[in-house]
């Protein structure tokens, strides 16, 4: 898919500041290549190859660039009469927010944007604080989690309190160090009992774990995390963006 020069120039408005979270979450080589594009604005595969910390073939660079473009992280543009392929940044703040809302709807609202809008409307009427929601949740988590014990309950609670978590996220939240293999084994057991579910993260192959039991309380806590992470805690801003998603395309 090719993008207009105007679209590319709009994306270049991101500048060379901090990279988007979606870029920072990539595997190291992909992140380095995407970072070169974001800091330079518009580059060819040859330009990227010249700036890499370790030498890899031009064909490999092109393959990674095209994969990142197919995932919506980069824009791909044909330039000049010879149709030279160049790459530019694609992730604007608005785009990242849209992806986050659509992913939340899939994860917690059975894919319904309308249901998400209703939840945001409730938040807009009365915006609870994260500490308030956590306090209510910790006092009465789902019954199935209360039956767990020890480390199994601890890792499950991390997922439910955060809305979604990778193995690294879980490890960072535990009271004492636990190996990756141990955490993965516990998560597989919870998955087998339908207490958690897993999916691939949006822009790379890392597994993300989600609550398997989605009560209203669980969904509200996850929604609050989304608002704080992507919308500065503003349910009104998120509701406006969600209503925009609901508009029929022309």
Image: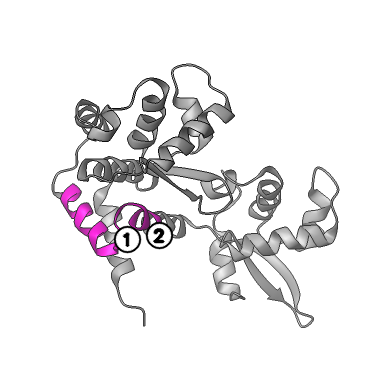
Q: Residue at x 66, y 62 (%)?
A: 67
Q: Give SS at disc 1.
A: helix
Based on the displayed image, in which of its 4 quarters is residue 132 positioned?
top left
Nearest the camera: 168 or 6? Answer: 168
Q: Does the segment drawn in magenta span residue 168? A: no
Q: Does the segment drawn in magenta span residue 114? A: yes
Q: Residue at x 34, y 36 (%)?
A: 160
Q: Give SS at disc 2.
A: helix
Residue 5: percent from left, percent from top:
60, 74
Q: Is residue 164 visible?
A: no
Nearest the camera: 228 or 143? Answer: 143
Q: Are marks 1 and 2 in contact (CB under 8 Å)?
A: yes
Residue 70: percent from left, percent from top:
61, 65
Report which residue position mark 2 lands on.
98
Nearest the camera: 116 or 10? Answer: 116
Badge 1: residue crowd in 10 Å (few <14, some 14–19, many ≥20):
some
The magenta region covers: 103-124
Report which residue position mark 1 lands on.
241
């Amino acid at each position: 898919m090719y993008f207009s020069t105007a679209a590319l120039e709009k994306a270049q408005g991101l500048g060379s500041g901090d990279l988007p979270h979606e870029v920072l979450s990539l595997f190291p080589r992909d992140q380095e290549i995407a970072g070169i594009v974001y800091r330079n604005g518009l580059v060819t595969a040859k330009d990227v190859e010249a700036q890499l910390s370790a030498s890899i073939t031009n064909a490999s660079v092109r393959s990674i660039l095209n994969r990142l473009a197919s995932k919506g992280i980069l824009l791909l543009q044909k330039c000049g009469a010879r149709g030279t392929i160049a790459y530019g940044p694609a992730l604007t703040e608005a785009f990242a927010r849209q992806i986050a809302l659509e992913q939340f709807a899939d994860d917690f609202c059975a894919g319904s944007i309308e249901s998400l809008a209703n939840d945001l409307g409730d938040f807009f009427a009365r915006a609870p604080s994260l500490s308030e929601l956590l306090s209510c949740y910790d006092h009465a988590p789902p019954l199935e989690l209360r039956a767990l014990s020890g480390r199994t309950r601890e890792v499950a609670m991390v997922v439910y309190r955060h809305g979604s978590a990778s193995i690294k996220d879980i490890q960072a939240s535990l009271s004492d160090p636990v190996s990756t293999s141990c955490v993965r084994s516990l998560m597989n057991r919870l998955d087998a009992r339908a207490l958690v579910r897993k999916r691939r993260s949006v822009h790379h192959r890392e597994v993300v774990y989600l609550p398997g039991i989605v009560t209203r309380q669980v969904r509200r806590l996850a929604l609050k995390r989304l608002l704080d992470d992507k919308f500065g805690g503003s349910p009104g801003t998120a509701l406006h963006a969600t209503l925009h998603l609901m508009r029929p395309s022309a």
